[in-house]
Image: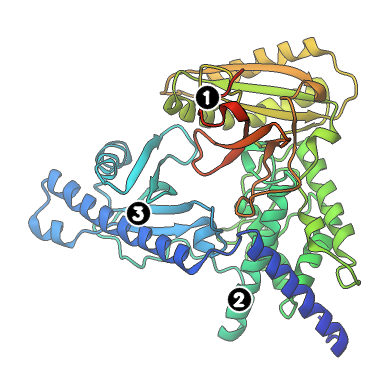
Amino acid sequence: MPRLPPYMAELEQECSVSLRQLMVNEGLIPSPEDDKKRRSVIHMLQRIVVRWIKIVAWKRRLPQHHINATNATIIPYGSYGLGVHGSESDIDALCIGPFFATITEDFFIDLHDLLKSRAEVSEVHCVKDAKVPLIRFKFDGILVDLPYAQLRVLSIPNMVDVLNPFFLRDIDDTSWRSLSGLFQSLLRCVKLWAKRRGVYGNLNGFLGGVHMAILAAFVCGYNPNATLSSLVASFFSTFAYWQWPTPVVLLRDAYAATGSPPGLMPIQLPCGGRQYCNSNVTRSTYCKIMSEFHRGHHLTKGYLKHGFNWNSLFEPYPYATTYAWFVKIHLSASNEEDLSDWVGWVKSRFRSLLIKIEEVFGLCDPNPTEHLEACEKQPNIVYYWGLHLRTVNVSDIESVETDFLKNVNNSGSFQGSVGGIQLSVVQTSQLPKNVECDTSNRNKRVTRTCWRVRDDNHCKDKPVYSRHLPGYVVGYEKINDRDAESTDVKC
């Protein structure tokens, strides 16, 4: 990158300071107290899994010297492992155990029971039917996703390096530390952008965390001396005009790909030869992602001009004013625990639903925001996916529902209680009363795009949290003044 004149360098620094302040305001940078709490959670989990593996070794009647020597460990990964977690982020941590500890019996039964017996642990669920089976729970109020890996050894070192994220080489330690800090800041920014603009989440056909991390690393690798503000601008200028399906490759000389790369937006993993991130991108979501890349480029190309405001980049996507029609997806179950398992199972099949909707209705925007119909007796979660058509044959949704039900019922062995699925097509005017995309008065600690009931002189807003994702605000309940003291919503 060419050296900038002094006045331009000052502008760059001012823009970067402004962007970092926005990150602080949005709660993207956790407080020292929050970081300390998360480190404590990891430390306590480490002690728990060591105790667990000793118990398993004793149950397997291993010799005492083997029991003394055996060990298991916890390895943080995901946003926390990369150091880009926010104050509301969960913790992704991999439990690694030795050869004699099985996932079906020892992990999902013994470790599950051990966790459930702890006072600090609540809402423990075994997610066995996911592509990556895991135990999900809250530890001191922090959501933890804990998958399991079994190695063919007796003992796992506490500092085992099985998830080495090194994707840049041949730079000195000082440059690496500097670049790592900029990479973390860039990744925080682009993840916030993706969530606000509705292009984040692999299950809904968009970009997941690993995709965003590799794209951010790619930009950092080609701009090693850039400021944060110029990296953000470079991110959008790079991918707004990327010639997909040309793959994004970090270590081009290390792993020569053969054949055609998979998917519409192939992104190669840096840790294995010719392996790509699994992506659910479809024709619809590809168009949405590219549209947002171009919007981001249009907004950030003038970031050094007077009066530029970073907030415009992160404005929530205006679903309610963009689409005239929506596919309504209503999921329900008999209780909240069953709903958690049922929603997770159905969401893992969302790509097939999206493809079917594309066949019948054309382009579709799968808004990942959760809603609930509070007037219903059964626990429920509702999604509204935007349709690009101005006129829709409402009856066509029946064939989509029939096809999706077959997919959900035939694509695996769901072991929980089967819930309900109802698909319908509604107009914008039929959305829940006074619902709009929230663009003001947001809780700054909530980084997810959320829908809310518009406040007025006669109503108060009560936040509603996801029934299966603790801490996830899914909307607001309208409560009349006379009922404000009650927790019931009057229908």
Residue 158 to residue 107: above or below: below
In the picture, measured across the screen, residue 428 lies left or right of residue 380, that is right
- Front one among 173 and 42: 42
Measure the C-alpha gap from mark 3 to mark 1.
45 Å
Residue name at image x 85 percent, y 35 percent: 322
- Front one among 290 and 13: 13
From the viewer's perspective, is the residue at label 3 or at label 2 nearer? 3
Secondary structure of the residue carrying numbered label 3: strand
In the picture, measured across the screen, residue 417 lies left or right of residue 276, that is left
Secondary structure of the residue carrying numbered label 1: loop
User: Amino acid under label 1?
Assistant: Asp
Q: Which residue is mark 1?
A: 488
Label 1, residues with CA under 10 Å away: few <14, some 14-19, many ≥20: few
From the viewer's perspective, is the residue at label 2 or at label 1 nearer? 1
Q: Of all residues shown, which one is farthest toward the bottom? A: 6
Measure the C-alpha gap from mark 2 to mark 1.
58 Å
Quarter where residue 398 is shown:
top right
Residue name at image x 44 percent, y 59 percent: 76
User: Amino acid under label 2?
Assistant: Arg
Quarter where residue 388 is shown:
top right
From the image, which quarter does the C terminus lie in?
top right
Q: Position of residue 411 (x, y in %)?
A: 54, 23
**Is there any visible trace of residue 259 in the rendered image?**
no
Secondary structure of the residue carrying numbered label 2: loop
Residue 169 numbered mark, or none: 2
Q: How is the image coloured?
A: rainbow
Q: Which residue is mark 3?
A: 96
In the picture, measured across the screen, residue 119 lies left or right of residue 92, that is left
In the picture, measured across the screen, residue 87 lies left or right of residue 360, that is left
Whichever of labels 2 and 1 marks the residue nearer the N terminus, that label is: 2
Measure the C-alpha gap from mark 3 to mark 2.
27 Å
